[in-house]
Each structure stands twice: as C-alpha cells, then as structure tokens.
Amino acid sequence: SRLVLTDAGAGNQTSIDGLNLSPGGFYWWKKGASGEVGSYAAMIDNATALLSGHLQVQAPGYQEDQHIEDTVTGSAALANSLRQQPGVRAVAERVVAFTLASAGERSFAGQLLGIDVEHERLVSNIPAVIVDGRYLRDTPDGAVVEAVAGAGLARNLGVRVGDEVILLGTDATGGVAALVTRLVGIFSTGQAELDRFLLEVPIAAVRDAFSIADEAHQIVVRAYDVRALPRVTGQVRAVVPKDVTVLTWQQLMPELQQAIELDRASGQFFYGILAIIVGFSIINTFIMLVFERTREFGMLLAVGMRPWAIIGMLQIEALWLGLLGIAGGLIVAVPCIVWVAQVGIPLGDDAGAMLAAFHMPDRFYTALHVDAIVPPAITMLLATLFASAVGSLRVLHVRPVEAMRAA
C-alpha cells in the first residue's frame, strides 16, 4: 500500500495531468450543469408564472374536455388546506367559462377566468403586465363588476379602460349566463393567442352568474422551489380527495417539457464529446506513463508482482488524477457559479428584448445545486478510471528482462 501511495503522490506528470482536467471540470460545472439547472428552473418558473402554476387540482377529465360542470367541490376549504403544506408558496381558486364578449356592435369569443383576487397575484404574473389601467379589486355587493382583458381582445372589441363589456355564456345548469362588467385594465402577456381571448373577473361574480357554488375548475398551486416539486406534489396528492386529479406542470405544459428534454439531450451529447476528449487525453497519459516507467514495472514483475496488481496501482493513480481534476474544477467553478447566480450574464440587447416580450429575464443565471455538482463529478471520475484502465493494459505486454535492460 505504501508503494501505491508513493507512486500516486510522487508522479509529477500525474499531478500535472490532474490539473489539466480542471479546466474541463470548470467548464462543465459553470457553463453546463449549473447553467442547465439555473436556466431550466428560470424557464419553468417564468412559463408557469404566467397562468398555469406549478400544479393544478382539477376534476378528472377537465383538462381535456373543460366542461363547465366538471368542478372540484369544497374548493375554498381545500385551497386553505393546501396553503398549510410545507413548500407551498400560494394557492388560488379559479372558475373557468367560455363566453361571448360584446361591446357595442362587436362580439368575440373569449375565455373568462373567475379569479380569487387576493391570491391570484401570488400564482400569476398577469397583474404585473397591465399596460393600461389597473388590476382587479374585490367587487363589493351591488357594485359594478370589474374586468381586465387581453390587449388583443380589447382591440378587437374596440374598448378602452372604463368601457362596458357584456359577457354571455352557458351556466352549469344549461341556462343562459349574463354578466355586465366594466373594463378597468388591459394586459399584454406577449403571447398573442392569450391576449386575444382571455378575460379575468372576480370569482364571486362569475360563480353567481354561472350558477356555481363553492366549487372551482382549477385550484392553482405555486411552490417556493421548482426542484422541490416532486415532494410538494406528493404532499398535495396526500391532501386532496381521491376523486380529483393533481396535474403537474409537465402535464399542463407538455410543449415546455419537450423543449427542455430536447435541450437536455443536446447538452448530454456535448458532455459526452467532452468526456471522450478527456478520456483520450488520459489514455495517452497512461500509455506514456507505462513507457516512462517500463524499468520500474520490469523490476516489480521480476520480484513477483502480478501485472494486474500493477494495473490496480495505476488505477489508484488514476483515481488521484480524477479527484485532483475535480477538486481543481470545483475550486475555480463554485465561486463563479455563485457570482453568476447572483448577478447573471447579460444576453445582449436583441436577446433581452425578445425575452422581455415573454417576461423572462434578460440575463443568464446559473444555480449551485447538488444536480449541478454530483453527476458531472461522477461522470468525469468514471471516464478517468475507464481511460486509465485502457492505457494501463500495456503493462500486460511488459517482459521483465527486456524492461530491466531499458535505459
């Protein structure tokens, strides 16, 4: 064992090559793994903050058919229970109805959201994208019902803040529902389809007009941390009744999940190429190491040491090499990751303007998380050990007598 430790620690070339691995590890952690974790978390947070939330509690089948009679009963009590769960940041009830919005002689189809004004601000950023007027306030009994509409719908109807908008639809009993509202705000999400058909009205007015009692079509849940969603999802499923469905953001926004998976696959392909490059460098290192230490290996074989024992000794050197590279990469990468996570890297005016249209940050942020540290470290270490094993196989062809004659 002393021989192994001596060989592992005394080889200057081994230490130098270990340090040569540090830039690869630094790039992997800073630009790759930590960037993925940070950018994916930001992408999910920003996409779900617009409307869907991280989770939704719905009646079975509602996501596909969206029938007005498919509701979650006792929604107020259930929402209050969900707010008590660890990791849950906010919960809001919604009633959804399809309506014909009319103003003067113009009429257009739209989707009406009856929202809990107090809690909706915590699960959706639509209140933050009001471009004219203001967001909703709770409507007192007998007062004019307030509404906010997307910029596209307001333009199609030819209405401005202060104008009257009449909403007609079918209530939960099959009858006609009518709601007279006053437009108090216009929002622009940057998504034309959403801005063209969405309206929001306080939930009490929608329930009254559409004959819906203490029920909701959606109970929207927002968590504190995207990475804690599996645990939060389990907690929510444990609280809700068995006859309702809990949908994750992946089910609510499958196109976002597909985009992330595609990006992750391309990233893994790149990391694979990086691992191959590192691997060939290590194979070359250990082939040269065997050539340089042929006389030493010949002496070890002459005194009875088996070739596979020498290969095992070289594997320990490779382990030292890998750990040295990982340590060097971490020492350089972690401060950079922390700094970029706090400050961000500007993406330029053009990219910033494009992202601003979707209410996403105009800077690239990383995240220091176990998922950004452990998998790359294990992969680099395994690649190092595998490559060293391939390079060390040359020991099997060393002949003791010929090796000891070598200069």
Image (cartoon, rainbow, N blue to C red):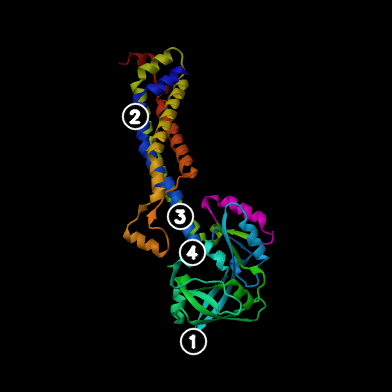
The kind of residue on which mark 3 rests is Ala
The reply to whether residue 144 is visible in this rendering is yes
Quarter of the figure with the C terminus: top left
In percent of width and height, residue 372 lies at 46, 44
- Residue nearest the observer in this picture, 328 or 122: 122
Q: Mark 3 points at which residue?
A: 42
Q: Mark 1 points at which residue?
A: 104
Is 231 a magenta residue?
yes
Residue 211 appears in which quarter of the rendering? bottom right
Q: Main structural element of the magenta stretch: helix, strand or loop?
A: helix
Crowd rating for badge 4 (residues with CA inside 10 Å; few <14, some 14–19, many 20+) = some
Q: Earlier in the sequence, mark 4 or mark 3?
A: 3
Q: Earlier in the sequence, mark 1 or mark 4?
A: 1
The kind of residue on which mark 1 rests is Gly
Crowd rating for badge 1 (residues with CA inside 10 Å; few <14, some 14–19, many 20+) = few
Boundaries of the magenta span:
223-244
